[in-house]
Amino acid sequence: MPFEIKACTIDEVRRHPTLGGRTQAKVKVMLREVLSRKTFDHNLTLRVWAETNDRMSPHEVNTALLVKAASILKRTVAIAELDAEGTGRVPPSSLSG
């Protein structure tokens, strides 16, 4: 896989202003891409949300937000890798993601 997660932080965590039970945040991710012995760093900011409640600890809320970020990041990287070889051909999608 040409992408590697180098750093991941949660920033600006807050409750949704109108939807109770929802927490919003920005997750900042630094990806490293290696193509033909060249290294490229990509800084991404993902806006995520998770269903939460007042009984959840801050750790549980952060875990829920990171799970959402991981899902978004998996889709983003999968799209970026479709044509990583520059052939112009797009492989068929898999059932797993």
Image (tube, helix red, strand yellow):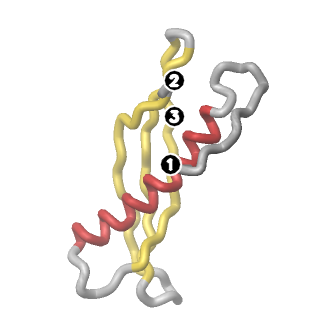
Task: Specify the label residue 42 is tagged with.
Answer: 3
Q: Residue shown at 50%/48% (left/top)?
A: 73
The residues tagged by marks 1 and 2 sit, at their Cα atoms, a distance apart of: 17 Å
Do the residues under discs 3 and 1 have CB atoms within 8 angstroms? no
Secondary element under disc 3, as helix, strand or loop, is strand
Residue type of the residue flagged with mark 2: Phe
With 73 as the anchor, is 90 left or right in this view? Answer: right
Q: Amino acid at mark 1?
A: Leu
- The answer to whether the residue labelled 3 contacts the one labelled 2, judged by CB atoms less than 8 Å apart, is yes
Residue at x 47%, y 81% (from the top left corner): 16
The one of 39 and 91 positioned closer to us in this rendering: 91
Which residue type does callout 3 highlight? His
First in sequence, mark 1 or 2: give its number.
2
Which residue is at 49% across, 20% downward? Answer: 34
Mark 1 or mark 2: which is in front? 1
Residue at mark 3 to residue at mark 2: CA–CA distance: 7 Å
Q: Earlier in the sequence, mark 3 or mark 1?
A: 3
Q: Taking 93 as reference, is 65 above or below it?
A: below
> Distance of mark 3 from mark 1, alpha carbons?
12 Å
Q: Residue furthest top?
A: 37
The quadrant holding residue 86 is: top right
**Quarter assignment of residue 85:** top right
- Residue 83 percent across, percent down from the top left: 68, 28
Q: Which residue is mark 1?
A: 73
Q: Position of residue 11 (x, y in %)?
A: 38, 59
Place of residue 64 in the rendered image (x, y in percent of width and height, measured from the top left): 35, 67
Q: Which mark is residue 40?
A: 2
